[in-house]
Amino acid sequence: MSPSSPLSQQSNSRFLLPAAAFVIVVAGMRAAEPILVPLLIAGFLAILSASPIFWLREKGIPAPVALFLVILGVLGLGFGFIVLIGTSLDDFSDAIPRYQTQLTEKMGPLLLWVQGLGFQFSEEMLLKYVDPGASMRLVGRMLSGLGGILANSFLILLTVIFILLEASSFPKKVRAAFGDPKGTFSQFSKITDAVNNYLAIKTLLSLATGIIVAIWATMLGIDFPVIWGLLAFLLNFIPNLGSIIAAVPPVLLGYIQFGLGRALLVAAGYGLVNVIFGNIIEPKLMGRKLGLSTLVVFLSLVFWGWIWGPIGMLLSVPMTMIVKIALESSPATYGLSVLLDSESSVAKATEGKEPTSTV
């Protein structure tokens, strides 16, 4: 059969059409960043806010009052974030050039120590390939991006309110639209419950991580402890890599302020918090199904960061997790969800299973 046969052309079109559609969708998402990012944040906030509303309604509180109380709580948290970022971001941005200069000066003794171990590097060569202030600038860009999102807080709040107002009637609309009260809606409900469970647990653990980090940084005398707690809270949504990224700036700042000993103490505190929450508490609360491959985490971080910048990096893993949960809910796509799983999750899933004989 020749390469130009109808069968070959049909096979090529099956690949080219989805690939072209994917490129168009990605380009559209990148162009629509000012609209899509606030809507996604509103969607996550609505999912987190739905459970308290349903809980209050089960206690006999009318729906409008429950909605008002939850929205009041969201407003309080949002105002707190605005105050934290507004008071700390300007001071930290002004201090970044000073920290970069001090860190460059501190590289001299460190370079001598490395040369004493037998490695020959000149200071010019080291500064050419290693930018010691890059992590500080990255933190500044991430917080600036978060501040830009908070500038759209009114749009986000309105979207959350409208989503929550529609939440109670949405099941009826699904049943009326698809005429399948058990199939379509049960699958959608399963996905929603899993996403809600993931976001709720991850948010609480991230909040605890941020508070402990802020307290630890305060005890050690590190500048801007609130920023490091906020950064630890946000980056804890990125498993494996997030805790490392969050620890680098305060460790460097501890080295700038007090020397290598204090920097090691900062790193030890981050490591202990990450081991307790990331390796002990979180797996027990979430179970094996919510593990993501480290490669998938890294690729999603690069992909969504390229599309939406620092905010895309923060949203990358929650969105990938939603995709994984959606794939797990259908037997037809379960195999794809396994490809996104972490190695330990796959090992636990197959543990004790013997290969079946085909005889």
Image (spheres, grey):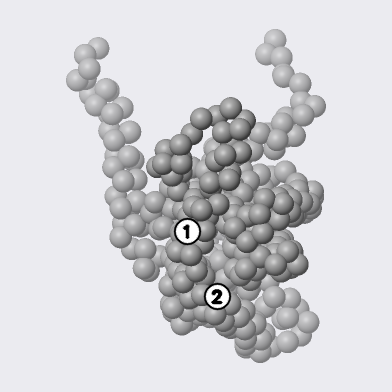
Q: Count neighbours of disc 1 (C-alpha within 10 A) and say few if under 14, some if 14 to 19, many if 20 or more.
A: few
Q: Disc 2 to disc 1, how far (Cα)? A: 20 Å
Viewer can see residue 258: yes
Mark 2, other Cα within 10 Å: few <14 / some 14–19 / many ≥20 = some
Residue at 22% x, 17% y is 3
Q: Residue furthest top?
A: 359
Mark 1 = which residue? 101
The numbered dot on residue 260 is none
Q: Which residue is mark 2?
A: 88
Name the image quarter holding the C terminus: top right
Under circle 1, the secondary element is helix
Residue at horizontal 47%, vertical 59%? 101
Say what amino acid the circle numbered 2 marks.
Ser
Q: Quadrant of the N terminus?
A: top left
Residue located at (41% from left, 58% from top): 309
Q: Which quarter of the picture shows residue 357?
A: top right
Quarter of the image where one finds residue 141: bottom left
> Can residue 274 be seen in this snapshot?
no
- Give above or below for 264 relative to 164: above
Q: Name the residue nearer the viewer: 16 or 279.
A: 279
Q: Which of the two discs, 2 and 1, labels the residue nearer the N terminus?
A: 2
